[in-house]
Each structure stands twice: as C-alpha cells, then as structure tokens.
Amino acid sequence: MNTAELAETCAGAVSGGRLGRMLDELAQWGAREDGGVDRQTLTTQDLSARRWIAGLYATRAGYKVAIDAAANIFIRREGNDPALAPVLTGSHLDTQPAGGRLDGAFGVVAGLEVFNALDEAGIRTQRAMEVAAWTNEEGCRFSPGLMGSNAFVDPTQMDGLRSVLDAQGITFGAAVDSACQDFAESARSNGWHGFDAPMKRAIHACIEAHIEQGPELERAALQVGCVNAIQGVRWYEMTFSGRSSHAGTTPLAARDDAMVKAVAAAHAVLGMAALEMQADPSLRITVGRFQALPASINTIAREARFTIDLRHPDDKVLEAMQVRLLQLCAQASHTAVLLCKPPVPFDAALHQLTQEACTRLGLPHMSMLSGAFHDAMPLAAHTPTVMLFAPSRDGLSHNPAEHTPIEDLTACTRALAFCMTRLACPN
Ligand SMILES: [Zn+2]
C-alpha cells in the first residue's frame, strides 16, 4: 500500500461507535445535571479525566504516557523510527463551569480514536504520533487561557504563570504540582510507568480537531471545516469626558454632556461597521459595552465610554480599520488598546492536506477561519499547524446544550486520521 492508501485505510477504520462511547465516558467526569460538563482545569474532575485517558493507553503495547512541567499530558504511539519528531494532535480536557461535552474533549478523543483505528488496521507508522491534553485552555479557573500550550512552546513563561492565583488563592504552580503527583500516583497504583516529556521539543506537524463553536458549517450543511487561520483580534476602549450637572436645571447652552459625544461616536462606528461588514464578510466590529458615569437618571454624564471588538484574518485590514475607528472617535478624551492579538495563519501545505483528505474520503467540507482562540494558536509558532472543525448545532458552545451529530464527529475524525497517517508515513 502507498501512503495515501494507508491513510484511507486508517480513516476507514475510524469507528463512530467507539468515538461516541469514549465521549460519553469522558463526560462523566464533571457531569452536570443539565447534561453539560463542569470540569475546570486541574480540579478533581479534571484529574479523574486525566487518570482515565492515561490508564486507557499506558499499558497498551506500543504506547507511552508522559507529562510535562505544565502538566500537559501526552499519549504517544511509537513509530518505527523513534528518533523522528512525532506528529501531534489533541486539544484540552478542561471546560467552562457551565460547559458542554465536546469543546476540547472532542479533539482529545478524536486523536485517541485515530490510535484505535491504526491498531485495528494493523498500521505501523514511520513517525510516532502523540495526542496532547493541554492544561488550562479555557482560562476560567486561572486566567488567561492557553497556559499549557503557551508554556510548551515557550517554557520561559512558566515562572510567571506558576504564580497566577485562582479564586481560592491556589497558585497555578501548586495545582500543576498536584496534577503531576496525581499522575505519578496513578502510575504507581496501576502498575504502569509515567514518563517526563520535555517542553519545546521538536514536533513534525500539529493538527487540532475541534468543534466549530459557530454556525457556519451547519448553515452550509457541511461536515468538516478545513481551518486556514485564526483571525486577529483588537479591543479598544473609547472614553469621552464632560461635566456632571443637574438634569432638570441645566439648559442646553450650559451642558457639557459626555453621553452626547459618546453616542455620536458609537453611532458613527456602528454605521461604518455595518457598511464594511457587508462589503467584507470576514470583518467583525462590535460595540459590546457602553457605560456612563455617574450612571444616575437625573445627572448629566461626566464620563461615557464604550468598547470596540475588531476582528479580521488580515493584520493590514485591522490596521486600516483601527485608523478609521480612531478618526470616528476623535472627540474621545482617551483611547486605549486593551488587547492586540495578530492573526495566526496556518500552514498552507497542511491546509491543502486537510482538503485533500476530505476530497478523497468524500466528506463535504469547506475552508474557513477560526473565530475563537485554540491551543493550535501557540503551536503554530513552533511547528507547521492546522485545524479541522466539526459543526456545532445552532452554533452553540460554552453551553451545556453543545452538540454535534456523531456522524459529523466521525467524519472530522476520519479526515484527522487520513492527515495524521499521511504525515507519519514516508511518501
Ligand atoms: Zn476549546
């Protein structure tokens, strides 16, 4: 068999039944009564889920389970040449407090199902493959998110990250240390060996599977999204100043009303935004927060401010939009950039491979952007990286009602299996 045939064989061995059962089992750890999952990072629920996935593979022939200094877990399926850099997939096991069963969990389980399919088809690959479960993607217990994947790519961040506190005053460092101890204890009591994984090691390629968390694939009735970039995000806060005075006694000529200035500017921003978003479907401009001070019903505002969330896959467009937004807010007494995340383009050859996989497997697919951040974002700075999306029902995520039909999850896992096998075998 040539590599493409091997890849098709592996994709064909992916089982929706196995995938669904693993997702059901994983959803027990932190299960909510409403059907959702509350499995925040490094809590007892998360540690149980980690023990479960480690235990599934640690004693299976040809596998190793490892943990690194950020408590990222790696399940490794050895290749014929252990010296070659591995092909990496995976996502995160942690969820929002009122999260769903699939955000993160799908990407980890999809990677494990690729392993099951390879085992069932008896395929040995040249390179090793690894499934990562990255620590604290969500950023709700410890802020910000993406801590595990960021630390893997740049271990010098670990010192700073370790001192971040949760609401109970527990440091991220202490939580990571207990997760590492729990992993070692699980290995001891179950008679397997847990390995230490170095950070920032060579990775041949990285493919993360994830649910879309938006409505586009469902709307287009497609099963797989081949993600070519994560869009850039910039956040602004525009502040307008005036003078507080009595609403009943102050005539127009004597007013210096911050609200008048802010509303006029916000109106101009939203008008421009509607025209530009119509002309460019990739553009997003949102005024999400509007505040007045002192926020009193019978006092003219001394200060009014609003935020702008600007998103686009092209940094040049973001830059040009920023100039226009600042012009429209020229009356502001203060403008602040609260966040500036440049777009992350994914590897063009890997993006092409994801499309080839869908075409060969007959999976209805399209190219698309990611509107949300993912562990693949830091990884893209370290190794060629790409993502595959499965549709989200009603575009819902970060919600207990998060759902994707198993046929669509299986389709996305087949595409992942094809790509990983192609990357792990010689041409
Ligand atoms: Zn996620």
Image (cartoon, rainbow, N blue to C red):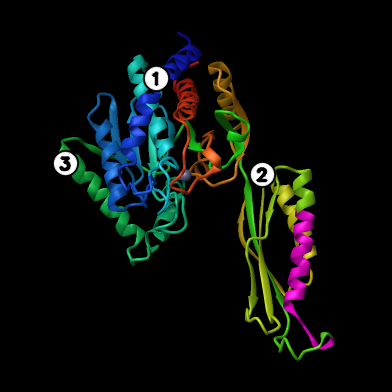
Can see residue 87? yes
Q: Residues within 10 Å of mark 3 (few under 14, many from 20)?
A: few
The nearer-to-camera label among 2 and 3 is 2
Q: Quadrant of residue 157?
A: bottom left
Q: Which of the numbered marks, if any, corresponds to residue 27?
A: none
Q: Which of the numbered marks, if any, corresponds to residue 313?
A: 2
Report whether 326 appears left or right of 29: right
Specify which label sits upstream in the sequence, 2 or 1.
Answer: 1
Specify which label sits upstream in the sequence, 3 or 1.
Answer: 1
- Hey, what amino acid is under mark 3? Arg
The residue to which callout 1 is attached is 125
Callouts 2 and 1 close, C-beta under 8 Å: no
CA–CA distance in space, label 2 to label 1: 35 Å
Specify which label sits upstream in the sequence, 2 or 3.
Answer: 3
For the view shown, which residue lies furthest in the right direction? 253
Q: Which of the numbered marks, if any, corresponds to residue 188?
A: 3
CA–CA distance in space, label 2 to label 3: 47 Å
Q: Position of residue 210 (x, y in %)?
A: 49, 37
Q: Is residue 260 magenta?
A: yes
- Hey, what amino acid is under mark 1? Thr
- Hey, what amino acid is under mark 2? Pro
User: Mark 2: which secondary structure?
Assistant: loop
Q: Residue at x 42, y 60 (%)?
A: 160
Q: Is residue 146 magenta?
A: no
- Is 277 above or below relative to 56? below
Can see residue 80? no
Check mark 1 vs ligand 1: CB closer than 8 Å? yes or no.
Answer: no
Give the magenta range.
253-273
